[in-house]
Image (cartoon, rainbow, N blue to C red):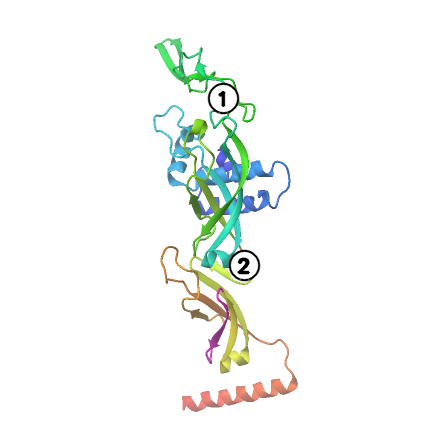
Amino acid sequence: MEFLQRLGLSMKVICFDRAILAYRKLARSFHPDVNKKPDAEQKFKEISNAYEVLSDDEKRSLYDKYGEAGLKGAGMDMGDFSNPFDLFESLFEGMGGMVFGVEKEIEITRLESCGTCDGSGAKPGTKPSKCSTCGGQGQVVSSARTPLGVFQQVMTCSSCGGTGETFSPCNTCSGDGRVRRTKRISLKVPAGVDSGSRLRVRSEGNAGRRGGSPGDLFVIIEVMPDPVLKRDDTNILYTCKVSYIDAILGTTIKVPTVDGMVDLKIPAGTQPSTTLVMAKKGVPVLSKRNMRGDQLVRVQVEIPKRLSSEEKKLIEELADLSKGKTATSRR
């Protein structure tokens, strides 16, 4: 239940939309750029890790069946399903940049190969020796007698961590072979991405142990809401207000779009809550050039609560004229 609890979800079976909503809410609260508390960064990483598992069908299936043991492959010969050196970060950006794509420079903190020991973890000038605990095998075997017989269990050697060698640790990295450093990465965000999208930057994650291959950097996109325009998949939603006179006679107004202010024709006789379509003024379709959604404009007709005596007189005359036309048409 731990990954569910990290996102504030208590149900064992949840829908993907709920996981996204929970992640967005918590990510905003604990993002290190917003929350300056000492534990905010660690909490944010835990939230991102939980989202990574629950939003991936394969990882979610393993988690549902076996819990975190399934994710680690404990007791199962299923192999690694992800690189343990992958790094996860989040990018918060406004709608404009995400609609047409943007190139951003982000700062990440990752584990890089130690320059003092060249990533070996050993103190310079020393050589590793065979582990005396496992005899260089990297594994130890324990036996247990039960009523059903003797069972043997193979475990990773705790003395050498499975390498089969022991050494004097490097003073810089304390034997890990890696040190934590900050780096700025240039990230190209393609047009049309939405909240929850994940961008992969190969080999920019944490360095592997003992000179192993580095992991990848995964950046989870979080699009900040626009105060005026609302996104619905590839469409943009907007509500405009027009007077009842303009709705009757028709007019042309300027409306905001992701391309800037654009003229929109309000046809004569437009009814309240009519939706007008501005073709190809929406969001570009991801990975499909020259394809865009539409902007859907809902027309809200404003009816005045108070009228001047002259306005009231004119409307009454219009009403009488309308009644006259109706009576004539019925004859």
> Which quadrant of the view contains residue 154?
top left
- Compared to residue 192, the image places residue 143 above or below, namely above
Residue occupied by mark 1: 122
Mark 2 or mark 1, which is nearer the start of the sequence?
1
Give the residue pinned by disc 2: 226
Tell me residue 317's x, y (percent): 56, 89
Label 1's element?
A: loop
- Locate residue 261 relative to residue 215 in the image: left or right: right
Q: Is residue 129 above or below residue 202?
A: above
Residue 130's place in the image compared with 190, above or below, is above
The amino acid beneath tag 1 is: Ala
- Locate residue 216: give its quadrant: top left
Q: Residue at x 46, y 62 (%)?
A: 236
Q: How many marks?
A: 2
Q: Is residue 199 visible?
A: yes
Residue occupying the point 41% across, 37% down = 60
Q: What is the x, y in percent for residue 302?
A: 56, 74
